[in-house]
Image: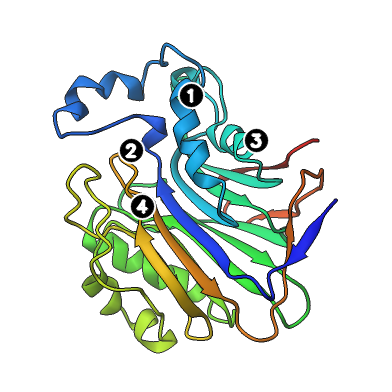
Amino acid sequence: MASQSTHSHPLRLMTYNIQVGIRTQRYSDYLRHGWRHVLPPASRTQHLEPIARILRDHDLVAIQEADAGSFRTRSINLVHYLAERAQFPYWHLHGHRSLAPLARHGMGLLSRIPLRSVEAHALPGRISGRAAVIYRFGQGSGILTVVVTHLSLGRSDRGQQLSHLADLVQSDPHVILMGDLNCEAPEFRSHHWFRERGFLAPVDDLHSYPSWRPRRQLDHILVTPEFSILSAGAKSFRWSDHLPVTMDVELPAGITLDRTTSEVQSDVPTRIAAAATTAWTASLRE
């Protein structure tokens, strides 16, 4: 196994709502291609290859609107497939809403860095099924916490969910939050958690939705103040109805992580924090 420290290299982050791999290039595609949310594509994997290619240059990729393997994906676990094709040695998929056998909604993380622990938490809301997954990396006092989530459409529910997230990571010193927050910067910045923790965000015009004419900044990567943001952007890749959002950061002092550059097999410890949720954890075989 080959590895290199992230100490002298920026940590390359991406968050991407992949819309189950469905290509959407205009509003009318929601109607024309809506059948793809319940019926499988003609090809098992061809439609996923362009997505896999854009993931490869990153260290941590948060994925939303994936599928754990169901009828609509021809039983393909989308996070596992993308991890394998983009050569990520570690991956985790959290299934947060099951409509089996037609669909098994999920989100997760692709990682080039070994995970220390994984926690899946159900989020409050009028409609059940929203969740946050907390990943921790590193050892001792140099712990990096990464939160992946996909928040609700309703503003009231989002406020409750952000408060719940604040409670979950209140004792974590170094936090990265990635995901589809379904809101723009002024809304989450008004929440007490972001004010108190001093979360840093890039410029306010990283519009990611809709992908064919981006006007709203719904997808975010946010970091606590100890990180230095080196670059950030919305990638011009119009496949899903969202654009991928990327960020390169310099790690806070005291955090040293090993980036794996070859495939390994390893057990990832997982703790499920809510009985109503189910998680799948895996690493790839050589």
Closer mark to the observer between disc 2 and disc 1:
2
Report the residue marked by disc 4: 235
The secondary structure type at the circle numbered 3 is helix
Mark 3 → mark 4, Cα distance in angstroms: 22 Å
Crowd tier of the residue under label 1, counting other residues whose Cα lies within 10 Å: few below 14, some 14–19, many 20 or above: few
Q: Amino acid at mark 4?
A: Lys
Closer mark to the observer between disc 3 and disc 1:
3
Q: Are marks 2 and 4 in contact (CB under 8 Å)?
A: no
| Disc on res. 100 | 1
Residue closer to the observer: 131 or 237: 237
- In this picture, is 8 found above or below 110? below
The secondary structure type at the circle numbered 4 is loop
Report the residue marked by disc 3: 84
Report the residue marked by disc 2: 240
Q: Earlier in the sequence, mark 2 or mark 4?
A: 4
Q: Residue at x 53, y 86 (%)?
A: 226
Q: Quadrant of residue 258?
A: bottom right
Q: Seen from this angle, which residue lies furthest left?
A: 28
How far from the left and from the top, in percent, is residue 217?
A: 25, 60
Q: Residue at x 43, y 59 (%)?
A: 246
How far from the left and from the top, in percent, is residue 176?
A: 51, 70
